[in-house]
Image: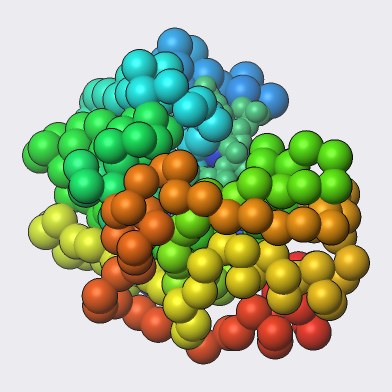
């Protein structure tokens, strides 16, 4: 349904910016919201105004906290503010962009950030609003951040992490399809997204380094992997068993250039 008013929260971020572009290409009226635009989802300042008259609100907010208490505080608190404000402004559907497997205690035991995502999903799924939870696997673009965090000089010590990554542009396209399909639906929905290949992030890093020579400004000479985030993450707990399988391979994404 073209011509909806859609508030994208976190619209300056990796997925939020791509999703906002996709939705505008489909002739929706998009409100791009973040602290830069004067809206703070943590305090609630500006949120009701940002949601007033909107048909759909999409939560693409992020705060990269490794401690569980900090991550839970951010994701639970922002989700509560969004749900409350959306309810009082009559928003018809809420979409929460989350991570496949992150809510599973066997996966998130050692990663506080994922516990935050679990808290966020819980707020939305128990909100009694019409909600879509997007369970996406990791994006190819995430590797920049992973390498920056895991590198010391010429050595990168990566967590052993098995993923079925896809490109953020393709994830945005599937989320936009879901928004178009779901607005008349009153039921809760789940959109599960994965890419075509299953690999460890070390294998992905090797492929990107071979093609581009660097990742996130790093040129590691040694890529070590250790299961320091636990066996759930190492052994495939982040790989969804079902859902949409996007067909853009890592090699095709690399061949197409930085924004595919
Ligand atoms: N990376 C992946 O591979 C992956 C995979 C699946 C799902 N996800 C999920 O997708 C979501 C978005 O991730 P991302 O990587 O696109 O995020 P990101 O690039 O870090 O962007 C985060 C956005 O949130 C905004 N923001 C942060 N705190 C805010 C606040 N208090 N109030 C209003 N806006 C705020 C930021 O803008 P300002 O700084 O201007 O406020 C920015 O626009 C996350 O929940 C993440 O868990 C990520």
Up/down of 155 relative to 77, above or below: below
Instruction: Tell me the quarter of the image containing the N terminus.
Output: bottom left
Up/down of 65 relative to 98, above or below: above
Which residue shows up at 70% across the image and 87% down it? 252
Up/down of 170 relative to 65, above or below: below
Seen in the image, is 210 located left or right of residue 121? Answer: right
Choose between 89 and 76: the one closer to the eye. Answer: 76
All told, the count of numbered labels is 0
Up/down of 197 relative to 23, above or below: below
Task: Tell me if I can see residue 90 in this picture.
Answer: no
Query: How are the colours assigned in the image?
Result: rainbow
Which residue shows up at 50% across the image and 74% down it? 199
Task: Tell me if I can see residue 65 in this picture.
Answer: yes
Choose between 250 and 37: the one closer to the eye. Answer: 250
Residue 234, quarter of the rendered image: bottom left
Which residue shows up at 74% across the image and 42% down it? 151
| Coordinates of residue 219 in the picture (x, y in percent) | 87, 55
């Amino acid at each position: 349904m073209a011509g909806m008013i859609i508030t994208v929260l976190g619209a300056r971020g990796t997925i939020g910016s791509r999703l906002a572009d996709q939705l505008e290409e489909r002739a929706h009226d998009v409100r791009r919201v973040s602290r830069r635009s004067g809206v703070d989802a943590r305090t609630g300042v500006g949120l009701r105004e940002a949601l007033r008259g909107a048909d759909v609100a999409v939560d693409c907010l992020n705060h990269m906290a490794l401690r569980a208490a900090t991550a839970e505080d951010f994701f639970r608190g922002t989700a509560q503010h969004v749900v409350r404000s959306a309810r009082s402004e009559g928003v018809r559907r809420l979409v929460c962009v989350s991570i496949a497997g992150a809510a599973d205690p066997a996966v998130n035991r050692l990663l506080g950030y994922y516990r935050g995502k679990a808290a966020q999903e819980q707020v939305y799924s128990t909100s009694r609003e019409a909600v879509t939870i997007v369970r996406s696997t990791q994006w190819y673009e995430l590797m920049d951040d992973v390498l920056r965090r895991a590198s010391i000089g010429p050595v990168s010590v990566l967590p052993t992490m098995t993923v079925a990554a896809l490109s953020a542009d393709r994830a945005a396209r599937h989320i936009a399809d879901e928004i178009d399909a779901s607005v008349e639906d009153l039921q809760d929905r789940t959109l599960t997204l994965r890419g075509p290949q299953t690999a460890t992030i070390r294998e992905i890093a090797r492929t990107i380094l071979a093609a581009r020579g660097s990742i996130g400004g790093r040129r590691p000479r040694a890529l070590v992997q250790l299961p320091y985030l636990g066996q759930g993450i190492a052994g495939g707990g982040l790989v969804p068993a079902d859902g949409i399988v996007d067909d853009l391979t890592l090699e095709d994404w690399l061949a197409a250039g930085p924004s595919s």
